[in-house]
Amino acid sequence: MQLDNQFVSSLPGDLDESIKPRQVYEAVYSRVAPKKAASPVVVDYVQDLADELQLPIADWEEKQAAAYLSGSELLPGSVPHALCYGGHQFGNWAGQLGDGRAINLGEVATQNGDAAMLQLKGAGLTPYSRSADGLAVLRSSVREYVCSEAMQHLGVPTTRALSLVLTGDQVLRDMFYDGNQAFEPGAVVSRVAPSFLRFGNFQLFAARGDLATLRTLLDFTIETYFPELGEPNEEAYVAWFKEVAALTCEVVVGWMRVGFTHGVLNTDNMSIHGLTIDYGPYGWVDDYDLQWTPNTTDAAHKRYRFGAQGAVSQWNLLQLGNAIAPLLAYVSPLEEVLNAYPQKYTEQYQSMMLQKLGLTQTDAKQDAALIAALEQALQLNEVDMTIFFRSLATLQTSATALQCRSHIKEALYEPKEFDDDHGLIQWLMAYSKRVAATVDETQLLVRREAMNEVNPLYVFRNYLGQQVIEAAEKGDYEPLRELQKMLRNPYKQQPGKEKYAAKRPEWARNKPGCSMLSCSS
Ligand code: AMP
Ligand code: MG
């Protein structure tokens, strides 16, 4: 096993090899060395991903595995490096950011002949660490480790998580940003993606007027990761932008389908491969609310709230378009892609919602009205998103008001009986009538199965995450492993796992970690 280094050998790097915080110019990356961990221990790793990456982790001695996966010892062929990128944070240009605690090691050859970049998160200082420590704590690493694999098995594009390692180092954090610092166990997650390039990688060179490096990076990106777009030229640049827009649309619609709120959709957290990346203060929607944000830093403006993710992704694409525009003689083709985006997003969102409802498209306007009415009724009540949608597959056709009420009872948060349902029961009755009118009786079973493939039974509920973190912090990793295993099959009923399909318990309603999270990680 030997890592490859196509990325670093093809692109300009930083000549200064020190880690002192600084501005780095005309370079896509800086070479760095991961920190040696005090006493690393592998908590868990994903066997099928290791197989896919042809990494024989099971054959390594425990100590060796912990050394490799913490960065204390380099895998053969590694050329560790941190990427230089910028980004818009909460709508404002933040200048250079870069990988402050993520270190790419090099590319592994996958079983199907692709190359995948292996990265360690939390492995120490880089020139982009600014005033921070380059480290990550156990709680945020557990969240990234479990959630990326949950996302993968839900069928939403994501970076993968390969391993979770405790470093044995203690890391100082002010978890609630309230002046109370405390030591927490340090951890490293190894993660995998075709590349970890973000919109912000392109933005930074454009912002500095460094068009030569911008072009070099874009040409490399197209040749390496989007070869189907042909020779890099102006036409290919536009095609690439269109492709990134399509991939972005797909991932966001995926989040809307499963009830995921990323929480920090800054342009430095937008993957050019359309992958969910950088699991920070994200959250899963319990009671359906398009206005909800899990991120305490975003509580005032809710820029990154659940229902705004489509619009925000468009804003982010505009920034990417602006970044590559200087390489084009005419920007109108980029504008066309951007102008088409809202329509494309709406179409895909609606088609996804119809799938969740188990309906075939009839009249676009009528379908849109049906979906909007449901969104409104769900928000005016307190209804668990996952349980509600899952239950639709077994709702009787032409159901009465009474049948509808009892059918969705389990999805309701307190109070379980509502006086004014804001039209929810009416909606359900009309819906079940439409199902009766449009779905052939013989097709009901097929329809139910199809719905169960898009409406998960189990998601990584915020409080479940918090529970496995609390156990892990006490040294008990079994709950984490059990949850991780269960989330590999989110659409199939698993005997004995009913508790994971239940709605959020009342004690978790306002508990930190279960409802709101800070960026501290
Ligand atoms: P994030 O909000 O996690 O996407 O991070 C935003 C920026 O802050 C990125 O440039 C990160 O690399 C950097 N950053 C976050 N946490 C740390 C840390 N503990 N040490 C160094 N840099 C960090
Ligand atoms: Mg980030």
Image (spheres, grey):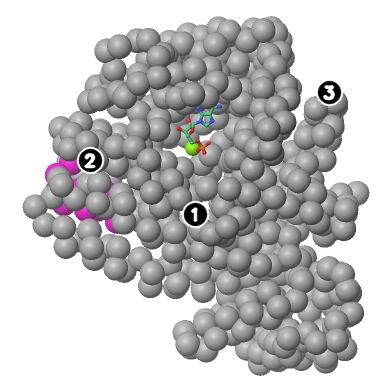
Q: Name the residue under label 2.
A: 206
Instruction: Mark 2 and mark 1 in contact? Answer it, CB < 8 Å.
Output: no
Number of numbered discs: 3
Give the residue at mark 3: 475
Residue beneath the point at 44% across and 18% down: 126
CA separation, marks 3 and 2? 47 Å
For the residues marked 3 and 1, what is the alpha-carbon distance in whole angstroms?
A: 35 Å
Q: Residue 419, relative to residue 464: is it above or below?
A: below
Residue at 35% from the left image edge and 10% from the top image edge: 17
- Pair 3/2: label in front: 2
Describe residue 140's horizontal placement relative to residue 500 as left or right: left
Task: Give the number of the mark in front: 3 or 1.
Answer: 3
Q: For residue 254, say whether it is visible.
A: no
Q: Is residue 92 visible?
A: yes
The x and y percentages for residue 456 are 70, 59
Mark 3 is on which residue type? Answer: Gly
Is residue 16 left or right of 464 when viewed as pictured?
left
Label 2: which secondary element: helix
> Which residue, given by chain and number where applicable, does mark 1 sit on?
251
Residue range of the region highlighted in magenta in the rendering: 232-243
Quadrant where the C terminus sits is: top right
The x, y position of residue 374, in whole percent, is 65, 80
SS of the residue under disc 1: helix
